[in-house]
Amino acid sequence: MSALKIKKGSNSHSAYNLRPNFSDVIERHTLAVLVENEPGVLARVIGLFSGRGYNIDSLTVAEVDHTGHLSRITIVTSGTPQVIEQIKAQLGRIVPVHDVHDLTVEGPVVERELAMFKVNGTGDKRVEALRLADIFRANVVDSTLETFVFEITGAPEKIDAFAELMRPLGLVSVARTGVAALSRGD
């Protein structure tokens, strides 16, 4: 209750909109940030997230323009719409940042990730691991008498599904690159 004893958003006779105009829904967003390829830029971007308590679900960085010395940072993060807007605004204020795109709101996006899985197993478990790898189009990049190392590329959901199926078959370790994303179309 406010000091005027009016419940927030409950009075239809008020001239003021007392309902909050923000959402509490946590959304996952993929941000593409074009930055100068110089020392300390990544640390400044990461410092922005850690200093404000924002989480990074995935982070991928690579130089995309050798002559212009530009790198692209792809960040997957989660938050309310207000938090995402705040992150984009604060990223845009960092000096070496050229451009910030929220690929999630700009339209359809193609997201891919590379992962390697080490699976330990013999007998039926080994045969089942090979069968599942074939279904998921995973490549065997290393093999011993007791282990396989699989390489798989795809959407993060595909990687997660493959990992869940490999756990009971003897999954030993996983290495993931992080999400690389581009918007579709024009």
Image: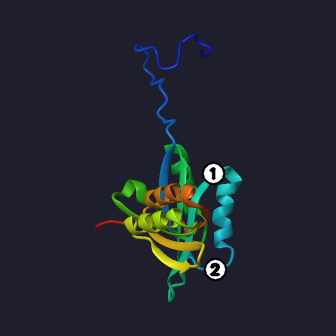
User: What residue would you read off at disc 2?
Assistant: 38
Residue at the top extreme, as displayed: 5
Give amino acid for label 1: Tyr
User: What residue would you read off at disc 1?
Assistant: 54
Residue at image coords 47%, 20% = 9
Label 1 or label 2, whichever comes before in sequence order: 2
Image quadrant containing the C terminus:
bottom left
Which mark is in front, 1 or 2?
1
Q: Nearer the viewer, residue 177 or 98?
A: 177
Residue at image coords 59%, 77% = 145
Image quadrant containing the N terminus:
top right
Residue at the front extreme, as displayed: 123
The percent coordinates of residue 45 (x first, y second) are 63, 64
Residue at image coords 63%, 80% = 38
Q: Quadrant of residue 58?
A: bottom right
The percent coordinates of residue 86 (x first, y second) are 56, 50
Q: Kindly tell me whether residue 100 is visible in this rendering.
A: no
Give amino acid for label 2: Glu
Q: Kindly tell me whether residue 59 is visible in this rendering.
A: yes
Dot 1 lies on which element? loop
Residue at image coords 57%, 65% = 59
Q: Spatial distance from mark 1 to mark 2, Cα to Cα?
A: 24 Å
